[in-house]
Amino acid sequence: MKFDTIRGALLLMLGMGCVDGAFAAGGRTIEAAPGADMIVDVTAGLPGATGFTQEVWRADGTARFAPADAKSAEIAWKERLRTGDDSVDAKNAGDDKTVSTGDQYWTAVNAKTGAKYRVEMPRELAHELHRLALQSGAASGDAKGATEALADIGGTKGWSDGVDTRTRRFDNTAFPYRAMGQMGGGPTSGCSGTLVGRRHVLTAAHCLYNRDDDYWYSLSATRFRPGREGTCAGDSCQPYGAHDATWYFTPEQFRASDTDWTYDYAIMVLDTAPGDETGWLGYVAIGEDSLRDYCDANSFSLGQCFNRGYPACGLSNAPVRYETCQQGWAYQDPKPCNIGGFGSTGSDGWKSRFSTNCDLSGGHSGSAVYTNRWAGANNVVVGVVSTQTCSTCTASDDYPNGIRRITPDVLDAISYFKSTMP
Protein backbone atom coordinates (compact mmCIF):
# COMPACT_ATOMS: atom_id res chain seq x y z
CA MET A 1 0.00 0.00 0.00
CA LYS A 2 1.23 3.46 -0.82
CA PHE A 3 0.54 4.90 2.61
CA ASP A 4 2.68 2.20 4.29
CA THR A 5 5.91 3.58 2.85
CA ILE A 6 5.07 7.15 3.78
CA ARG A 7 3.83 6.37 7.28
CA GLY A 8 6.72 3.94 7.83
CA ALA A 9 9.23 6.68 7.03
CA LEU A 10 7.39 9.08 9.33
CA LEU A 11 7.45 6.60 12.20
CA LEU A 12 11.14 5.93 11.64
CA MET A 13 11.82 9.63 12.11
CA LEU A 14 9.50 9.83 15.10
CA GLY A 15 11.31 6.92 16.70
CA MET A 16 14.61 8.83 16.66
CA GLY A 17 13.90 10.73 19.85
CA CYS A 18 10.96 12.79 18.65
CA VAL A 19 8.26 10.75 20.37
CA ASP A 20 8.35 9.44 23.90
CA GLY A 21 6.03 6.70 22.75
CA ALA A 22 3.95 4.05 24.41
CA PHE A 23 3.68 0.69 22.70
CA ALA A 24 0.73 -1.64 22.48
CA ALA A 25 1.65 -5.13 23.65
CA GLY A 26 -0.91 -7.90 23.36
CA GLY A 27 -3.66 -5.31 23.17
CA ARG A 28 -2.60 -3.63 26.44
CA THR A 29 -0.99 -0.22 26.31
CA ILE A 30 2.05 0.77 28.31
CA GLU A 31 1.67 4.50 28.54
CA ALA A 32 4.50 7.00 28.46
CA ALA A 33 4.75 10.25 30.36
CA PRO A 34 1.62 12.45 30.38
CA GLY A 35 1.28 14.40 27.17
CA ALA A 36 3.36 12.03 25.06
CA ASP A 37 2.13 10.55 21.79
CA MET A 38 1.29 6.86 21.75
CA ILE A 39 2.50 4.33 19.20
CA VAL A 40 0.11 1.41 18.72
CA ASP A 41 0.31 -1.89 16.92
CA VAL A 42 -2.85 -1.97 14.81
CA THR A 43 -2.41 -5.68 14.04
CA ALA A 44 -2.11 -6.85 17.65
CA GLY A 45 -5.36 -8.77 17.26
CA LEU A 46 -4.54 -10.21 13.84
CA PRO A 47 -1.56 -12.54 14.38
CA GLY A 48 0.36 -13.15 11.19
CA ALA A 49 -0.70 -9.91 9.48
CA THR A 50 2.31 -8.41 7.71
CA GLY A 51 3.16 -5.28 5.77
CA PHE A 52 1.67 -2.79 8.27
CA THR A 53 3.27 0.10 10.06
CA GLN A 54 2.57 1.08 13.62
CA GLU A 55 0.28 4.08 14.06
CA VAL A 56 0.80 7.22 16.11
CA TRP A 57 -2.04 8.46 18.31
CA ARG A 58 -1.39 12.14 18.96
CA ALA A 59 -1.57 13.35 22.56
CA ASP A 60 -4.46 15.81 22.96
CA GLY A 61 -4.40 16.85 26.59
CA THR A 62 -6.48 15.45 29.41
CA ALA A 63 -10.17 14.56 29.28
CA ARG A 64 -12.64 16.32 31.57
CA PHE A 65 -14.86 13.85 33.38
CA ALA A 66 -18.38 14.44 34.65
CA PRO A 67 -18.73 16.67 37.73
CA ALA A 68 -20.63 15.39 40.75
CA ASP A 69 -23.86 17.12 39.70
CA ALA A 70 -23.67 16.06 36.06
CA LYS A 71 -26.79 15.03 34.17
CA SER A 72 -26.93 11.45 33.03
CA ALA A 73 -26.83 10.63 29.34
CA GLU A 74 -30.49 9.60 29.40
CA ILE A 75 -31.74 12.67 31.27
CA ALA A 76 -30.12 14.81 28.59
CA TRP A 77 -31.58 12.48 25.93
CA LYS A 78 -35.08 12.90 27.38
CA GLU A 79 -34.92 16.65 27.95
CA ARG A 80 -33.66 17.42 24.47
CA LEU A 81 -35.87 15.51 22.05
CA ARG A 82 -34.06 14.78 18.82
CA THR A 83 -35.42 15.75 15.46
CA GLY A 84 -33.47 16.24 12.24
CA ASP A 85 -33.21 13.09 10.15
CA ASP A 86 -35.16 10.91 12.59
CA SER A 87 -38.34 11.90 10.77
CA VAL A 88 -37.18 10.80 7.32
CA ASP A 89 -39.60 8.67 5.38
CA ALA A 90 -39.50 6.27 2.47
CA LYS A 91 -39.25 8.98 -0.16
CA ASN A 92 -35.68 9.58 1.00
CA ALA A 93 -34.63 6.00 0.47
CA GLY A 94 -32.31 5.14 -2.39
CA ASP A 95 -29.43 2.94 -3.33
CA ASP A 96 -26.30 3.28 -1.23
CA LYS A 97 -23.15 4.34 -2.98
CA THR A 98 -19.83 3.99 -1.24
CA VAL A 99 -17.36 6.80 -1.92
CA SER A 100 -13.85 7.38 -0.65
CA THR A 101 -13.77 10.80 0.97
CA GLY A 102 -10.75 10.56 3.22
CA ASP A 103 -9.62 9.27 6.57
CA GLN A 104 -11.63 8.87 9.75
CA TYR A 105 -10.71 10.88 12.85
CA TRP A 106 -11.50 9.63 16.33
CA THR A 107 -11.01 10.79 19.90
CA ALA A 108 -9.50 8.20 22.24
CA VAL A 109 -9.72 8.62 26.01
CA ASN A 110 -8.07 6.40 28.58
CA ALA A 111 -11.03 6.01 30.94
CA LYS A 112 -8.75 5.37 33.91
CA THR A 113 -6.09 8.07 33.51
CA GLY A 114 -7.95 10.69 31.44
CA ALA A 115 -5.18 10.81 28.82
CA LYS A 116 -6.75 11.90 25.53
CA TYR A 117 -5.50 11.23 22.00
CA ARG A 118 -6.43 12.14 18.45
CA VAL A 119 -6.58 9.06 16.25
CA GLU A 120 -6.12 9.51 12.52
CA MET A 121 -7.51 6.35 10.97
CA PRO A 122 -6.39 6.03 7.32
CA ARG A 123 -9.33 4.80 5.27
CA GLU A 124 -7.27 2.29 3.29
CA LEU A 125 -5.65 0.91 6.44
CA ALA A 126 -8.93 0.57 8.34
CA HIS A 127 -10.62 -1.07 5.38
CA GLU A 128 -7.75 -3.53 4.96
CA LEU A 129 -7.93 -4.42 8.66
CA HIS A 130 -11.65 -5.07 8.29
CA ARG A 131 -11.00 -7.24 5.23
CA LEU A 132 -8.52 -9.28 7.26
CA ALA A 133 -11.03 -9.46 10.14
CA LEU A 134 -13.59 -10.90 7.73
CA GLN A 135 -11.12 -13.45 6.45
CA SER A 136 -10.12 -14.53 9.96
CA GLY A 137 -13.69 -14.55 11.28
CA ALA A 138 -12.97 -11.73 13.74
CA ALA A 139 -15.90 -9.68 12.36
CA SER A 140 -18.33 -12.55 12.90
CA GLY A 141 -20.28 -13.26 16.05
CA ASP A 142 -19.25 -15.97 18.48
CA ALA A 143 -21.94 -17.80 20.46
CA LYS A 144 -19.35 -19.70 22.54
CA GLY A 145 -20.99 -22.99 21.70
CA ALA A 146 -24.47 -21.99 22.83
CA THR A 147 -27.70 -22.89 21.10
CA GLU A 148 -28.99 -19.57 19.86
CA ALA A 149 -32.30 -18.29 21.18
CA LEU A 150 -34.69 -16.72 18.70
CA ALA A 151 -36.57 -13.51 19.35
CA ASP A 152 -40.29 -14.08 19.45
CA ILE A 153 -42.61 -12.41 16.99
CA GLY A 154 -46.12 -11.12 17.56
CA GLY A 155 -48.05 -8.38 19.28
CA THR A 156 -49.10 -5.07 17.82
CA LYS A 157 -47.35 -1.83 17.03
CA GLY A 158 -46.16 -0.20 20.18
CA TRP A 159 -44.93 3.12 21.49
CA SER A 160 -44.61 4.41 17.97
CA ASP A 161 -48.41 4.62 17.87
CA GLY A 162 -48.77 5.89 21.41
CA VAL A 163 -48.97 2.42 23.03
CA ASP A 164 -46.00 0.67 24.62
CA THR A 165 -45.90 -3.11 24.04
CA ARG A 166 -42.46 -3.87 25.43
CA THR A 167 -42.23 -6.83 27.76
CA ARG A 168 -39.64 -7.73 30.39
CA ARG A 169 -37.27 -10.44 29.23
CA PHE A 170 -36.27 -13.37 31.43
CA ASP A 171 -33.92 -15.12 28.97
CA ASN A 172 -30.98 -12.79 29.30
CA THR A 173 -28.46 -15.57 29.93
CA ALA A 174 -29.23 -17.14 26.53
CA PHE A 175 -27.24 -16.13 23.48
CA PRO A 176 -27.35 -13.52 21.94
CA TYR A 177 -28.99 -11.67 24.82
CA ARG A 178 -26.19 -12.34 27.29
CA ALA A 179 -23.88 -10.35 24.96
CA MET A 180 -26.18 -7.33 25.46
CA GLY A 181 -25.99 -5.37 28.68
CA GLN A 182 -26.60 -2.25 30.71
CA MET A 183 -24.11 0.57 31.12
CA GLY A 184 -24.34 2.21 34.54
CA GLY A 185 -28.04 2.16 35.22
CA GLY A 186 -30.46 3.85 37.60
CA PRO A 187 -34.05 5.19 37.66
CA THR A 188 -33.04 8.21 35.57
CA SER A 189 -29.69 7.16 34.14
CA GLY A 190 -27.90 4.48 32.18
CA CYS A 191 -27.44 3.29 28.63
CA SER A 192 -27.19 -0.05 26.86
CA GLY A 193 -24.45 -1.65 24.80
CA THR A 194 -23.58 -4.78 22.86
CA LEU A 195 -20.44 -6.87 22.83
CA VAL A 196 -19.01 -7.08 19.31
CA GLY A 197 -15.75 -8.62 20.54
CA ARG A 198 -14.39 -10.28 23.64
CA ARG A 199 -14.12 -6.88 25.41
CA HIS A 200 -15.47 -4.43 22.84
CA VAL A 201 -18.82 -2.74 23.48
CA LEU A 202 -20.66 -0.95 20.68
CA THR A 203 -22.87 1.85 22.01
CA ALA A 204 -23.98 5.45 21.32
CA ALA A 205 -21.43 8.27 21.49
CA HIS A 206 -23.75 10.28 23.75
CA CYS A 207 -23.49 7.46 26.30
CA LEU A 208 -19.76 8.18 26.72
CA TYR A 209 -19.53 11.92 26.10
CA ASN A 210 -21.81 14.85 26.98
CA ARG A 211 -21.16 17.34 24.21
CA ASP A 212 -23.56 19.96 25.61
CA ASP A 213 -21.34 20.41 28.66
CA ASP A 214 -18.06 18.97 27.30
CA TYR A 215 -17.30 16.13 29.66
CA TRP A 216 -16.88 12.35 29.57
CA TYR A 217 -18.91 10.05 31.77
CA SER A 218 -17.24 8.32 34.71
CA LEU A 219 -16.37 4.65 34.97
CA SER A 220 -19.35 4.02 37.25
CA ALA A 221 -21.71 5.62 34.73
CA THR A 222 -20.49 3.33 31.94
CA ARG A 223 -19.92 0.13 33.97
CA PHE A 224 -21.06 -2.73 31.74
CA ARG A 225 -23.16 -5.63 33.05
CA PRO A 226 -23.90 -8.15 30.28
CA GLY A 227 -27.11 -10.16 30.64
CA ARG A 228 -28.16 -8.15 33.70
CA GLU A 229 -31.31 -9.28 35.51
CA GLY A 230 -32.13 -6.88 38.34
CA THR A 231 -30.27 -4.50 40.59
CA CYS A 232 -28.72 -6.74 43.22
CA ALA A 233 -24.94 -6.99 43.30
CA GLY A 234 -24.73 -10.79 43.31
CA ASP A 235 -24.44 -13.38 40.57
CA SER A 236 -28.21 -13.73 40.28
CA CYS A 237 -28.47 -10.15 38.96
CA GLN A 238 -25.03 -9.89 37.37
CA PRO A 239 -24.49 -13.37 35.93
CA TYR A 240 -21.43 -12.28 33.96
CA GLY A 241 -20.10 -9.65 36.35
CA ALA A 242 -19.65 -5.87 36.17
CA HIS A 243 -16.87 -4.53 33.95
CA ASP A 244 -15.21 -1.12 33.83
CA ALA A 245 -13.89 0.54 30.70
CA THR A 246 -10.27 1.15 29.94
CA TRP A 247 -10.80 3.09 26.68
CA TYR A 248 -13.52 5.29 25.18
CA PHE A 249 -13.54 5.92 21.41
CA THR A 250 -15.89 8.40 19.70
CA PRO A 251 -15.82 9.89 16.19
CA GLU A 252 -14.33 13.36 16.23
CA GLN A 253 -17.30 14.67 14.21
CA PHE A 254 -19.68 13.86 17.05
CA ARG A 255 -17.81 16.16 19.40
CA ALA A 256 -17.60 18.92 16.77
CA SER A 257 -21.35 19.60 16.62
CA ASP A 258 -24.16 20.00 19.16
CA THR A 259 -26.93 19.12 16.73
CA ASP A 260 -25.62 16.56 14.21
CA TRP A 261 -26.42 12.96 15.17
CA THR A 262 -24.84 11.37 12.11
CA TYR A 263 -21.88 10.16 14.19
CA ASP A 264 -23.69 9.05 17.35
CA TYR A 265 -21.90 5.75 17.76
CA ALA A 266 -18.92 4.73 19.90
CA ILE A 267 -16.73 1.86 20.99
CA MET A 268 -15.86 1.16 24.62
CA VAL A 269 -13.03 -1.25 25.38
CA LEU A 270 -13.31 -3.01 28.74
CA ASP A 271 -10.47 -3.81 31.08
CA THR A 272 -11.68 -7.41 31.26
CA ALA A 273 -13.11 -9.76 28.62
CA PRO A 274 -16.67 -10.93 29.44
CA GLY A 275 -17.08 -11.97 25.81
CA ASP A 276 -14.88 -14.99 26.49
CA GLU A 277 -17.87 -16.32 28.45
CA THR A 278 -20.87 -14.62 26.84
CA GLY A 279 -19.81 -14.61 23.20
CA TRP A 280 -20.49 -11.58 21.02
CA LEU A 281 -22.47 -10.43 18.00
CA GLY A 282 -21.12 -9.86 14.51
CA TYR A 283 -21.52 -6.59 12.62
CA VAL A 284 -22.47 -5.97 8.99
CA ALA A 285 -23.35 -3.14 6.62
CA ILE A 286 -26.42 -4.04 4.55
CA GLY A 287 -27.75 -2.03 1.59
CA GLU A 288 -31.06 -0.22 2.00
CA ASP A 289 -33.22 -2.58 -0.04
CA SER A 290 -31.70 -5.67 1.54
CA LEU A 291 -31.99 -4.21 5.04
CA ARG A 292 -35.68 -3.59 4.45
CA ASP A 293 -36.00 -7.20 3.36
CA TYR A 294 -34.50 -8.32 6.66
CA CYS A 295 -36.39 -5.90 8.90
CA ASP A 296 -39.82 -5.18 7.45
CA ALA A 297 -42.75 -7.55 7.86
CA ASN A 298 -44.35 -7.88 4.43
CA SER A 299 -45.41 -10.55 1.97
CA PHE A 300 -41.75 -11.33 1.20
CA SER A 301 -40.29 -11.21 4.71
CA LEU A 302 -41.38 -12.05 8.25
CA GLY A 303 -39.38 -9.16 9.68
CA GLN A 304 -36.32 -10.27 11.59
CA CYS A 305 -34.77 -7.14 13.12
CA PHE A 306 -35.17 -6.59 16.86
CA ASN A 307 -34.05 -4.39 19.72
CA ARG A 308 -33.49 -5.19 23.37
CA GLY A 309 -32.38 -2.56 25.87
CA TYR A 310 -32.35 -1.56 29.53
CA PRO A 311 -34.83 1.27 30.21
CA ALA A 312 -34.42 3.78 33.03
CA CYS A 313 -37.59 3.11 34.99
CA GLY A 314 -37.84 6.58 36.53
CA LEU A 315 -38.46 8.30 33.18
CA SER A 316 -41.97 9.13 32.01
CA ASN A 317 -41.86 6.87 28.94
CA ALA A 318 -40.54 3.76 30.71
CA PRO A 319 -42.45 0.49 30.11
CA VAL A 320 -45.81 0.50 31.93
CA ARG A 321 -48.37 -1.53 30.00
CA TYR A 322 -47.89 -5.05 31.37
CA GLU A 323 -46.27 -4.34 34.73
CA THR A 324 -44.47 -1.63 36.64
CA CYS A 325 -41.03 -1.17 35.08
CA GLN A 326 -38.39 -3.25 36.86
CA GLN A 327 -35.02 -1.56 37.10
CA GLY A 328 -32.02 -3.47 35.77
CA TRP A 329 -34.03 -5.74 33.49
CA ALA A 330 -33.98 -5.90 29.71
CA TYR A 331 -37.14 -5.04 27.77
CA GLN A 332 -38.03 -5.79 24.18
CA ASP A 333 -40.83 -4.96 21.79
CA PRO A 334 -41.99 -8.36 20.51
CA LYS A 335 -42.79 -6.83 17.14
CA PRO A 336 -39.87 -6.59 14.67
CA CYS A 337 -38.24 -3.22 14.05
CA ASN A 338 -39.68 -2.02 10.75
CA ILE A 339 -37.87 0.79 8.94
CA GLY A 340 -39.51 4.13 8.16
CA GLY A 341 -36.81 5.73 6.03
CA PHE A 342 -33.12 6.52 5.61
CA GLY A 343 -31.22 9.81 5.83
CA SER A 344 -28.02 11.65 6.87
CA THR A 345 -25.34 10.73 4.35
CA GLY A 346 -22.06 10.01 6.13
CA SER A 347 -18.47 10.38 5.03
CA ASP A 348 -18.52 6.92 3.42
CA GLY A 349 -21.38 7.95 1.12
CA TRP A 350 -23.98 5.72 2.82
CA LYS A 351 -27.13 7.06 4.46
CA SER A 352 -26.11 6.68 8.06
CA ARG A 353 -29.44 6.75 9.91
CA PHE A 354 -32.85 5.16 9.70
CA SER A 355 -36.07 5.57 11.64
CA THR A 356 -37.93 2.68 13.21
CA ASN A 357 -41.21 1.82 14.92
CA CYS A 358 -39.61 -0.25 17.72
CA ASP A 359 -40.73 0.80 21.19
CA LEU A 360 -37.88 2.53 23.01
CA SER A 361 -37.26 4.93 25.89
CA GLY A 362 -34.39 6.43 27.85
CA GLY A 363 -31.91 3.71 28.75
CA HIS A 364 -32.21 1.93 25.40
CA SER A 365 -29.65 4.36 23.96
CA GLY A 366 -26.65 2.47 22.63
CA SER A 367 -28.48 -0.85 22.34
CA ALA A 368 -28.36 -2.79 19.10
CA VAL A 369 -30.86 -3.22 16.35
CA TYR A 370 -29.89 -6.69 15.18
CA THR A 371 -31.07 -9.47 12.92
CA ASN A 372 -30.87 -13.17 13.73
CA ARG A 373 -31.19 -14.21 10.09
CA TRP A 374 -27.93 -13.00 8.57
CA ALA A 375 -26.29 -15.85 6.64
CA GLY A 376 -28.77 -18.31 8.11
CA ALA A 377 -29.01 -17.75 11.86
CA ASN A 378 -26.00 -15.62 12.75
CA ASN A 379 -26.87 -12.68 15.01
CA VAL A 380 -25.41 -9.44 13.68
CA VAL A 381 -25.77 -5.77 14.59
CA VAL A 382 -27.20 -3.51 11.87
CA GLY A 383 -27.73 -0.34 13.90
CA VAL A 384 -27.33 1.46 17.25
CA VAL A 385 -30.20 3.20 19.08
CA SER A 386 -29.51 6.92 19.04
CA THR A 387 -32.44 9.37 19.31
CA GLN A 388 -36.16 9.92 19.70
CA THR A 389 -38.54 12.55 18.33
CA CYS A 390 -41.17 12.14 21.08
CA SER A 391 -41.20 10.72 24.59
CA THR A 392 -44.92 9.96 24.92
CA CYS A 393 -45.90 9.52 21.31
CA THR A 394 -49.31 9.70 19.64
CA ALA A 395 -51.13 7.49 17.16
CA SER A 396 -49.65 9.54 14.31
CA ASP A 397 -46.04 8.90 15.39
CA ASP A 398 -45.27 5.80 13.33
CA TYR A 399 -41.45 5.82 13.27
CA PRO A 400 -40.28 8.09 16.10
CA ASN A 401 -36.95 6.52 16.97
CA GLY A 402 -33.62 7.18 15.25
CA ILE A 403 -31.00 4.50 14.69
CA ARG A 404 -27.35 4.99 13.75
CA ARG A 405 -26.94 2.47 10.98
CA ILE A 406 -23.89 0.23 10.57
CA THR A 407 -22.15 1.47 7.41
CA PRO A 408 -18.69 0.76 5.92
CA ASP A 409 -17.02 3.42 8.08
CA VAL A 410 -18.44 1.80 11.22
CA LEU A 411 -17.30 -1.65 10.11
CA ASP A 412 -13.77 -0.39 9.52
CA ALA A 413 -13.62 1.44 12.85
CA ILE A 414 -14.83 -1.54 14.89
CA SER A 415 -12.29 -3.82 13.23
CA TYR A 416 -9.53 -1.21 13.69
CA PHE A 417 -10.08 -0.91 17.44
CA LYS A 418 -10.67 -4.63 17.91
CA SER A 419 -7.35 -5.36 16.23
CA THR A 420 -5.50 -2.61 18.12
CA MET A 421 -6.98 -3.55 21.52
CA PRO A 422 -7.71 -7.33 21.25
Image: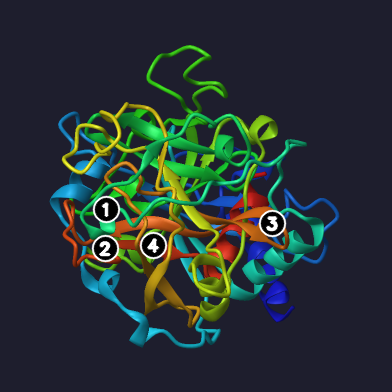
Q: Is residue 136 above or below residue 122?
A: above
Under circle 2, the secondary element is loop
Query: Which of the two discs, 3 and 2, labels the residue nearer the N terminus?
Result: 3
Labels 3, 2: front one = 2
Under circle 4, the secondary element is strand
Query: Which of the two discs, 1 and 4, labels the residue nearer the N terminus?
Result: 1
- The residue labelled by disc 4 is 403
> Disc 3 to disc 1, how far (Cα)?
33 Å
> Disc 3 to disc 2, how far (Cα)?
30 Å
Type of the residue with mark 4: Ile
Image location (x, y in percent) of residue 360 = 32, 50
The disc placed on residue 400 is 2
Type of the residue with mark 3: Ala
Under circle 1, the secondary element is helix
Q: Is residue 110 left or right of residue 10?
A: left
Query: Which of the two discs, 3 and 1, labels the residue nearer the N terminus?
Result: 3
Q: Residue at x 40, y 14 (%)?
A: 232
Mark 3 crowd level (few <14, some 14–19, many ≥20, 10 Å Cα): many
- The residue labelled by disc 1 is 159
Mark 2 crowd level (few <14, some 14–19, many ≥20, 10 Å Cα): many
- The residue labelled by disc 3 is 139
Q: Is residue 415 above or below residue 350?
A: above
